[in-house]
Amino acid sequence: MWRIPMAERYFKRYRMKFDCRRFSLPEPRLPQGFRWVPWSEELLEAHAYVKADCFRGEIDSTLFPCLANLAGCRKLMSDIAYQSNFLPRATWLIEDTTAAPGKHRYSHYCGTIQGMSRAFRVGAIQNVGITRDYRGQGLGKSLVARSLIGFAESGVQRVFLDVTAANVQAVALYERLGFRIESLSYQTVKLPESLSPALLARNVPPAIPS
């Protein structure tokens, strides 16, 4: 049986830090017609649906296969939400209140973010995403800002997140908010030899718009 030649590829990942003691927390604003939806257990499936819609076909779904489909995102959301260090105050959906009924009951939700505590006064942002049709409206920036306020309200002083370096728009957005690169690492993944990380990055839009 003929097999596609595979090779290990390395993707650079940044760990970025926001210091709530040094940076003023930006006021999160949403355009008219959008609203914040705080966490409730009944919305776990909605978070999973939006997460899957955001990351399907993206760089991060190659690095983390659980992001590539709804089943994987549903399990990931369950793993996040049922841990003792889950932070509901830092977990949000964005809803388009003007959206026409779609094919799915959760299609009017267009942004998702989750927060967790990692250590004393330390938190971590999980899987920020804005669906494709809603990018370019500043929703990603507002979503991260809303989560940061939730962290601060929970007593967290430092917030970390991890981002793929090839997602340059997301990196730039985080830097504008006040995040700074703390460290870097490399994620290894097997890809067809004909598909380089650079080519993948050029052909895949970022999950978080500027």
Image (cartoon, rainbow, N blue to C red):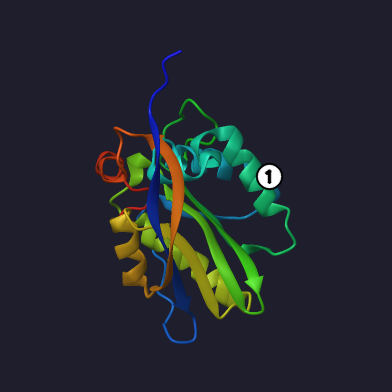
Q: Which amino acid does label 1 sit on?
A: Glu
Whole-percent x, y for residue 148 in the image: 50, 70
Residue positioned 62% across, 45% down in the render: 76
Q: Crowdedness of circle 1 by 10 Å Cα count: few (<14), some, many (20+)?
A: few
Q: Quadrant of residue 2?
A: top left
Asked where in the image residue 134 lies, by quadrant, the reply is top left
Closest to the observer: 69 or 105? 69
Give me the residue at 40% from left, 62% from top.
142
Q: In which quarter of the image is the C terminus?
A: bottom left
Residue 204, image x and y in percent?
31, 40
Q: Is residue 146 shown left or right of residue 179?
A: right
At x 65%, y 53%, the residue is 80
Name the residue located 60 percent from the left edge and 75 percent from the top edge: 122
Please say whether residue 96 is visible from this viewpoint. no
Q: Closer to the camera, 145 or 22?
A: 22
Residue under circle 1?
Answer: 42
Q: Is 42 on the left or on the right of 29, as rendered? A: right
Q: Is residue 174 left or right of residue 81?
A: left
Residue 51 seen in this snapshot? yes
